[in-house]
Amino acid sequence: MVQVLRIIFVLLFMAGVSLADEWKVFSRPSPVYAAIPYESGYILATAGGIQFSTPKINKLYTSADGLGATSFYGVVQTDSKVYGISEYGLVAAYDKKSARWSVVNRSYLNSRVHVVPGQVLAQKNVLVIAFENRLAFFDIEQNGYLLTIDRIGTVSLINKSPEKISIVQDTLFVLLEKDIYARKIDWDNIAKDIRLADPLSWTKKTGMGNLTQYFKDQITDFSTIKRETIFENYTLGNVYEMTAVSKGGIVAATTNGKMAYSDGKSWQNGTHIWKGVGSYTAAYDYRMKILSSLDDGLLLAHVWGKGLFLYKDDGYTLLKAFTPLDENSCLDEYIDDYTVAVGTAVAPDSSGFLVATSKQPAYGLVYISKNGDISCLPGVGSSSIAGTLAAKIDSKTGNWIVYVSSRDAFFASQGGSLDAIRVRPPSKNGGRLMLSEKKNYKILENRAPVDFAFDRDDGFLWMITVGKLSYMDEDLDTLMQPSSTKGLMGAEYTSIDRDVQGNIWLGTTDKGVFRLKKRYRSKDTLEAEQFTTKDGLLNNKVLDLAIDPVLGMAWFAHEGGITRYTRNDLKNAEKFMTSSAPADVKAYPNPFRPKQGKHLYIDNISEDSFVSIFNRGGALVRSFYDSDVLGGRAEWDGTDANGKLVAPGVYHYVVRKGSKKKSGKIILIH
């Protein structure tokens, strides 16, 4: 009972200081691969994390909670710890006293060999883990593998995978199809058993009759386990795309056609974009980017083959559908009654949306206004297949420049080029698009663009193909690649976005996420920071990403769910401490207990402000400026300039921006 209360206290404490937890994973804890009894309930190893499901504890742990991975195939416990074994053999340990997870071994991850679901055992100080092609023995005292074996008797485990393992007294049993092999093991001195790796030291058992006596009762019907499903109301499945919305948060779309809004804490119920259908494999195969949102909650979505759908309320109220079956529709049809688009984009004056629709022999452009009026400009593309697109206003003419991925095939990994289509905006042409000029840019490796992002500083276009990052040099009127990308390793790219600081974010198929910072404000000299499951990603396959400058969050889409990463410098602080500020300057938590919470936050301040903290006598304790206040927030850990924890008492903060001044009182308690 004391142990349960301790865990509950820790969980409540962690919830109270959630601002310090920058990473959060949204996933569904299913399917279940293994389960063990725990505190009148269960601990379950699932594809969406490790779930504690007891009458008093209902918590889902993921990579963001120190697990280092999210898909787990095995779970066992000893007197002091619970061990989770990931899909590829990462070993994580849960300390029952601290109620925290930590990764203790990653050595098997690079081999990318699956653990056999549910086949992990604990005996004395040893874990026995069945992989698809080997049997591994793990020392939980040394947190390292003792040895692995790939042959048992005359059988190669590479050709015949272990199906079940069991320990009866001091004997380990292994089921290989219909055959059972056994070996007696001195579990207290297993490291000295020099013949354990000898396949001939195993005995093939015959005439055993009922196998269940050798493979002890294991929970196989997980549907009978009663557990709560309160996981932030997250019900989405395979997410392939997201878009940030004006009020903060995102709308995410799944392959089966559902979409839902989240504020970073919980999720609204998902709705189907159109009558229960979706883009399915096309969403992944063609790198679709079909969600776009405007400042007043309007959202445009496309369902493969079915048409375009204009919503309000961030995707919860359908305003109008544009389908190829509509007699008044001007949509291109790639085949009869079948319209396809790989991307949508916001019109550069925010008056509506743009779409490129594929058709033989040349794709066309579509403009949909906020009111639901539609205008089509057919046959403007350099190919029949249109990919993703982005648009900006030409500063010289006022016309729109619409950049479109002109593809040789729907698959982005195949050939293609970049179209720059200049059109007269509808506001100057009776609500209709009118072609002004078109130019085509060849791409060095002859691969079509996958995604676009505009640079915050100067409006330059950034672009990725599946293997390259480049930008449009408008002075030279050509595509360029950065000359230096320190820390950016070779990867297959899926998505790109930029944040309010001008940094470029890249999603990849197997290397997580890269954040590229310009050195000396130059596009040609970039320095990369990488984020993977070690940091908190659900997994390293990122299908899309979106930067939310309102709440200061980076979002990453995965086949099994979504990762949300909160960091202060992602928040747009341009309006803070102005007449149109969304919120006033505040300090929290107040009173501040530095021994319980890591930081006191002075929030909603300008990025060019100067923050000072004084003691009751008026002496300066700490000051914050420049990089300390990125994103409009300063963080104080309760120490002075020398790093020494200050005495309890009353302190005062002063925030100055030019002639403006904001001040307040802080109570610090030890």
Image: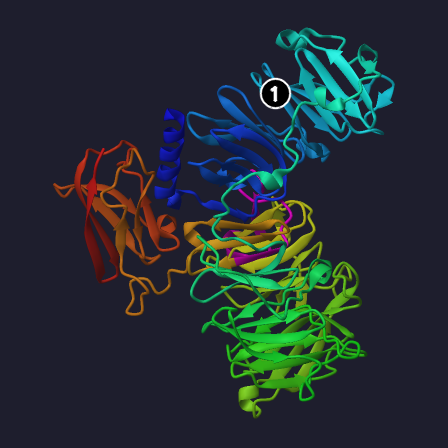
Taking depth in this image into account, of 135 and 147 the one nearest to the observer is 135
Residue 553 in picture, x, y percent from top left: 47, 54
Q: Quadrant of the N terminus?
A: top left
Residue 446 to residue 493: above or below: below
Residue at disc 1, secondary structure? strand
> Is residue 562 left or right of 601 when viewed as pictured?
right
Residue located at (72% from left, 62% from top): 282
Can residue 466 be seen by looking at this rendering? yes
Range of magenta residues: 519-546
Report which quarter residue 388 is drawn in.
bottom right
Residue 592 in picture, x, y percent from top left: 25, 41
Q: Residue furthest right?
A: 154
Taking depth in this image into account, of 264 and 270 the one nearest to the observer is 270
Residue 203 in picture, x, y percent from top left: 81, 13
Residue 513 to residue 9: above or below: below
Residue 448 in picture, x, y percent from top left: 73, 64
Taking depth in this image into account, of 432 and 341 the one nearest to the observer is 341
Q: Is residue 43 highlighted in magenta?
A: no
| Neighbour tally class for label 1: few under 14, some 14-19, many 20 plus, Cα within 10 Å | some
Residue labelled with disc 1: 122
Report which quarter residue 394 is drawn in.
bottom right
Residue located at (64% from left, 66% from top): 276
> Is residue 65 left or right of 46 when viewed as pictured?
left
> Is residue 593 left or right of 67 when viewed as pictured?
left
Q: Quadrant of the C terminus?
A: top left
Q: Is residue 522 highlighted in magenta?
A: yes
Residue located at (53% from left, 51% from top): 517
Q: Amino acid at mark 1?
A: Ala
Can residue 69 be seen by looking at this rendering? no
